[in-house]
Amino acid sequence: MSEARAEAQTGARGGRALSDFTVNLDVYSGPYEWLLALILKDEVEIFEVPLREIVSLYLDSRPTEAPDSLERDTDFAGSATALVLLKSRSLLPALDPEADDDDDEALSPEQLAERMHQYLKIKRGAETLRARFETYAGFHPSAHYAPPRSGKLRIRQDKLTIAARRTFSRLVEPPVEHLGPITLTLQDLAAVIRTSLAHGPVSYETLTEKMDRLHSAVTFAAALSLAYEGRITLHQPAPLGPLTLEPVR
Amino acid sequence: MTPPSPAALVEAVLLVSPRPIDRKSLQTATDLSEDTLKTALTELESRYAPERSGIVLRSVAGGYQLATNPACAPAIERYREEARPAPLSNAALEVLSCVLYMGPLTRGAISATRGVNSDAVVRGLLERGLLSETGTATDSPGSPALLATTDEFLAATGATGREDFPPLDSLVGPEELARVRERLTGASEAPAETPTNGAA
């Protein structure tokens, strides 16, 4: 179980109910709103996000006295429900539209019993494996990886195959239509940033002061992307402090 | 320079390998005969006995591997300033159990056995090196990849091979299976068990 904690400064900014709700999980640490964006872009795996912990974090940090508490609760309930739906749909086996109709028929009790038997055995096998993993966890191999010689870089076939499969194949994506159409892209906001930087550094707050929260979140993602590509630099002297974007000369 | 002893040669090769090395590869690398290699390994087993050494010689995954003595693990973890990796989730263990006992399997077959989509779990296990793609199911539409457990998996579970794991049918007693069947079918007597491919 991850060690999670909430850092919420309530009422710090008006107008964006959940903008100050941050989470600290094993798989992600940062604003809750960005977590939603990352999940929708498949950058964070929904399976690895502990939804129960997020709900607990929110309840622990919930400002009951804040004037926008109702709006905040409604926003959170809406997004959390969407996450639960997304996760539960993702857990179902992918539907094959060309599958035989026989597969849809209800299993007979005998067939169900056979499946349950098999699953019970697999589950017991998993318990055996857990015990073995625990027993042998203390062995650390010598781990002396010889560095590749110059000009003789070794490519591991199995790693290459996995990388190629991940690049050229995609899993069936869960339906997200209920979350609304995509109305803006990183490229759009990257163009806005580049234009704004034409006359020198600009603060993130200035850049996004007339934007709604979705545009602000995507603008931040675009800024990170540009910084990663080395096209701009980001300066933030203190955590959660003012952020300044500067062009790279 | 004095030529190294056979045990020294084997020891040196084992030291630079993070993975278990089988006898044939050891023989090729050290240019030792089978009997000499056997003697050298016996000498190393004695030298690296867990009672008096921080390093032990393991016989895992069909080969040999030098590793630290598990009794020293806390010191190593303090030195590396890293905790032991988080234990695998129940879902990951179930996927490994499926593949170990019924594999090689496709992702679809794993999901069908568990009753839930297991693609994300499989992806994590591939990245951890506990599963690998060993071929394709050519008789299935789209020739999906077949997954099998790896040598890293055997090393992590302290096994020399699949035969080290208890057979699948021995994991659940007939009385328990009969109870499941009775609950689902209402039958008072369980039919004869259909044989299942076990690991042994």
Image: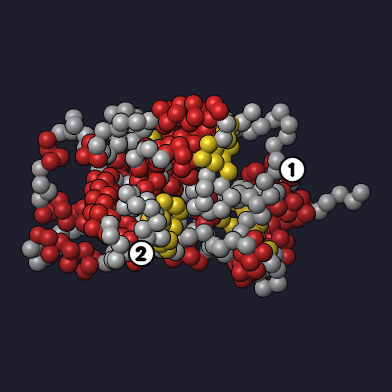
At 15% across and 51% down in the image, what residue appears?
A111
- Could you tell me the amino acid type at mark 1? Asp
On-image quarter of the C terminus of chain B: bottom left
**Which of the 4 image quarters holds residue B186?**
bottom left
The circle drawn on residue A9 is: none
> Closer to the camera, B24 or A9?
A9
User: Residue B164 in the image: x percent, y percent?
Assistant: 46, 58
Residue picked out by circle 2 = A61
Let me know if residue B90 appears in the view. Answer: no
Residue picked out by circle 1 = B31
Let me know if residue A247 appears in the view. Answer: yes
> Closer to the camera, A48 or A187?
A187
Chain containing mark 2: A
Extreme residue toward the bottom, this view:
B51
Extreme residue toward the right, this view:
B1
Please check whether the numbered discs 2 and 1 fall on a single chain.
no
Extreme residue toward the left, this view:
B186
Chain containing mark 1: B
At 70% across and 41% down in the image, what residue appears?
A147
At 21% across and 39% down in the image, what residue appears?
A178
